[in-house]
Amino acid sequence: MVSLNDIVVSTSVRVGGNKFDEAIAAAIKRKYNVAIGERTAESVKIEIGSALPLERPLTMQVRGRDQVAGLPRTIEADSTEITEAIQEPLEAIINAVRAVLAETPPELSSDIIDKGMVMTGGGSMLRRINELLTEVTGVPCYVADQPAHCVAIGTGLALENLDILRDSLSGESSPYD
């Protein structure tokens, strides 16, 4: 939670796109007995992955190695099973968001309810993840423009405005402490 050029509340979880990919690969291995690589799992996530079930499920041909025969094999996966596969990493993200919202000072809570929260990073490009977070928190959730580039763009802006941010970087306490 950032306010007045300062971090008010924060938490960190080691969950992101790679955890989604690992969960997808494990689910395909478990259900179809087919091993897929990281790139294939990421492709499945991008092509048919969704945080919530889709009205019309998407399907995709997935190529991997049959665990029994050791030969190449193609299966058809659908977005519903991928949504189920990524529930554990999604829960970790949901719990982190809830924890930050629970620690947010009351003075900022009304702003959050009015303006919502903004997601950044590659993981925020997962279909319907913003809808899931809105549903479970009751707080509007939006995906930033160019979410995969936000950190780099923000770092550049911070460096251009370092004089404004010096107080925040010095470790002085927040006005919300």
Image: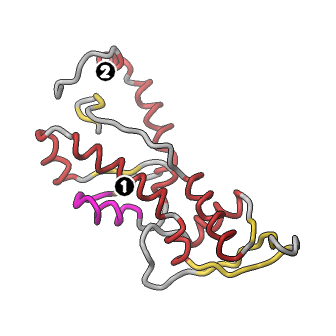
Question: Residue at the location (61% across, 58% down)?
Answer: 21
Picture quadrant of residue 35? bottom right
Q: Which amino acid does the dot numbered 1 rest on?
A: Ile
According to the image, what is the colour scheme of the structure?
A: secondary structure
The residue lying furthest to the bottom in this view is 56
Residues at marks 2 and 1, CA–CA distance in whole angstroms: 27 Å
Instruction: Locate residue 122 relative to residue 26 in the image: left or right.
Output: left
Q: Was residue 132 drawn as part of the magenta stretch in this picture?
A: yes
Of 151 and 65, the residue lying toward us: 65
Image x and y of residue 118, in percent:
34, 50
Numbered mark located on residue 162 in the image: none
Secondary structure of the residue carrying tag 1 is: helix
Instruction: Locate residue 161 relative to residue 20 in the image: left or right.
Output: left
Tell me which label, 2 or 1, sits earlier in the chain: 1
* Residue identifier under label 2: 168
Of 85 and 52, the residue lying toward us: 85
| Numbered range of the magenta stretch | 129-141
Q: Tell me the crowding category of disc 2: few under 14, some 14 to 19, or many 20 or more residues within 10 angstroms, Cα based.
A: some
Provide the major secondary structure of the magenta segment.
helix
Instruction: Locate residue 44 relative to residue 130 in the image: left or right.
Output: right
Image x and y of residue 131, in percent:
34, 66
Picture quadrant of residue 103? top left
Q: Are marks 2 and 1 in contact (CB under 8 Å)?
A: no
Question: Residue at the location (70% across, 77% down)?
Answer: 32
* Residue identifier under label 1: 94
Question: Residue at the location (24% across, 46% down)?
Answer: 101
- Looking at the image, is 3 positioned above or below residue 47? above
Q: Which amino acid does the dot numbered 2 rest on?
A: Ser
